[in-house]
Image (spheres, rainbow, N blue to C red):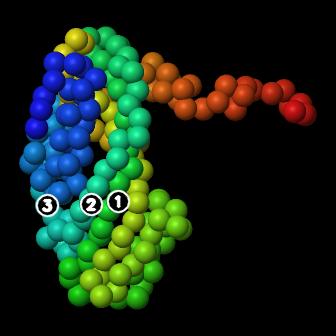
Amino acid sequence: MIISDDPSVALRDALVRYTDAAGSGQWEAMLDMTYAARFEHTPKQELLNYLKGTEANGIRLRTASTRINEISTPTVSGKEQFIRAETEADQTMELIRPQLRTPEYLDRTQAQLVAACGPDSVRFEEATNTFHFTSTQTLVGIAPEGSNDWGFLPLDSFTAEKGLVPMDILAKWVAEKVPAKSREVKPAGAVD
C-alpha cells in the first residue's frame, strides 16, 4: 500500500482501508479508523461486541467490492475538516444458522433488503443460503484542519442526532445534493 503526502490521495487511501476493513469483517481495524468522538456515545468495545455478535447470531455479512463514487471537497467547521463520500458495495449476507432459513425469515429479510437497496439489486442463492445485493452508503470523513488523520463513520440518523457533523456542514451537503429548484418554496396554489 502506498501512502501519499497529497491530501486527496491520502484521503482516498484511508477511505479504501476503512471500507475494506468493514467489508471483510475486520471490525477492530474498522473501529480503529472510526471517528473517535463516536465512542463518546457508544463505547468502542460495545460496538465491537455488536458487530461480532451479528455473526455469532448466525448472519455473516461480507462485501465483495466497494466503489467510491464521489468524495466531496473538504469543508472546515471549527477546527475540523469534513468530507462526504458516496459509496456503493456488492455485498453478501449468508444465513449460517438453520433457524434463520425459515420462509418467514427469508421473506422478511428479502423485503428489508429490497426496501433498502431496490428490487433489481437483491437475489437469494438457495444453495448457499446467501443473499446477494448492492447497497449505497454515504460516509463522513473527519480530520483535524490541515491533517490527513481521517476518521470515518456512516452518515445516518445517529450521526445527525448526536451532532457528530455540524449543522452547517449537513446543510451545505443537502444544498449540494438537492437541485435549487426543488428547494424553492412556492406560495399555496402556485403552478410551475
| Residue at the (52%, 67%) spot, across then down | 120
Percent across and percent down for residue 57 are 19, 72
Circle 2/circle 1 CB separation < 8 Å: yes
Say whether residue 42 is left or right of residue 136: left
Q: Earlier in the sequence, mark 2 or mark 1?
A: 2
Hey, which quadrant is residue 100 in on the image?
A: bottom left
Percent across and percent down for residue 39 are 17, 37
**Residue 64, label in figure:** 2
Neighbours of disc 3 within 10 Å: few (<14), some (14-19), many (20+): some
Which residue is outermost to the front? 2
Q: Which of marks 1 and 3 is nearer the N terminus?
A: 3
- Secondary structure type for disc 1: strand
Nearer the observer, 162 or 72: 72
Q: Label 1 belongs to which residue? A: 90
- Secondary structure type for disc 2: strand
- Secondary structure type for disc 3: helix
Nearer the observer, 44 or 84: 84
Hey, which quadrant is residue 89 in on the image?
A: bottom left
| Residue at the (9%, 48%) spot, across then down | 28
Q: Which amino acid does label 2 sit on?
A: Ala
Q: Which amino acid does label 1 sit on?
A: Asp
Residue 19 sits above or below residue 70 on the image: below
Neighbours of disc 2 within 10 Å: few (<14), some (14-19), many (20+): few
Q: In which quarter of the image is the N terminus?
A: top left
**Residue 52, label in figure:** 3
Residue 158 sits above or below residue 111 on the image: above
Q: What residue type is labelled 3?
A: Lys
